[in-house]
Amino acid sequence: MRAPQNLTIWTSGGYVAARMADWKLTADHDLDLSGGDVTVIKGQEAKAQHLRVALGFYQGEYAFDLRKGFPWLQRVLVNGFNEPDVLGLVRSYVVGLPGFESVLKLESDFDSETSTLKLSGRVQTSDGPVDFTREVQVAA
């Protein structure tokens, strides 16, 4: 099987792609082989997956460049949760991703009972708007 043209490539801890195409992943981030083969996704579907993966990538997780990733542990999941700071951090991170132009809507909800932060929003990409939700639980 040949790799698709313009495939999103992971290099040095960051994505490189002008027009994004990617292999479809399951909710558990495994290759989606439900059709008997890998599925190539493009456009908004690829951008939505890219954002889901990027927000799930913790800073310090990539051994070759510990600066890469979102600073969940360093800046977000700390004592004294500061919503405006977190939303600003998410906005900056998202618009720094290739093909992501602006954050149209961003909301957060912190459940102190379960120590869970839920982010949801809408992002304008070069392929159109993409909605997202990301839930992170603070380890007790």
Image (spheres, helix red, strand yellow):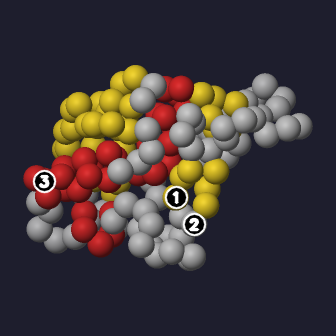
Classify 10 Å Cα crowding around label 2: few (below 14), some (14-19), many (20 and above): few
Image side of residue 32 versus residue 74, left or right = right
Residue where numbered disc 1 is placed: 14
Give the percent coordinates (x, y) of residue 67. Answer: 42, 72
CA gap, disc 3 and disc 2: 31 Å
Q: Are marks 2 and 1 in contact (CB under 8 Å)?
A: yes
- Compared to residue 119, the image places residue 92 above or below, namely below
Question: Observer-nearest residue: 20 or 1?
Answer: 20
Quadrant including the N terminus: top right
Give the percent coordinates (x, y) of residue 87. Answer: 19, 50
Q: First in sequence, mark 3 or 2: give its number.
A: 2
The amino acid beneath tag 3 is Glu
Q: Residue at x 62, y 34 (%)?
A: 21
The amino acid beneath tag 2 is Ser
Image side of residue 134 versus residue 13, left or right = left
CA gap, disc 2 and disc 1: 6 Å
Pair 3/1: label in front? 1
Residue where numbered disc 3 is placed: 83
Q: Residue at x 42, y 29 (%)?
A: 126
Give the percent coordinates (x, y) of residue 16. Answer: 56, 50
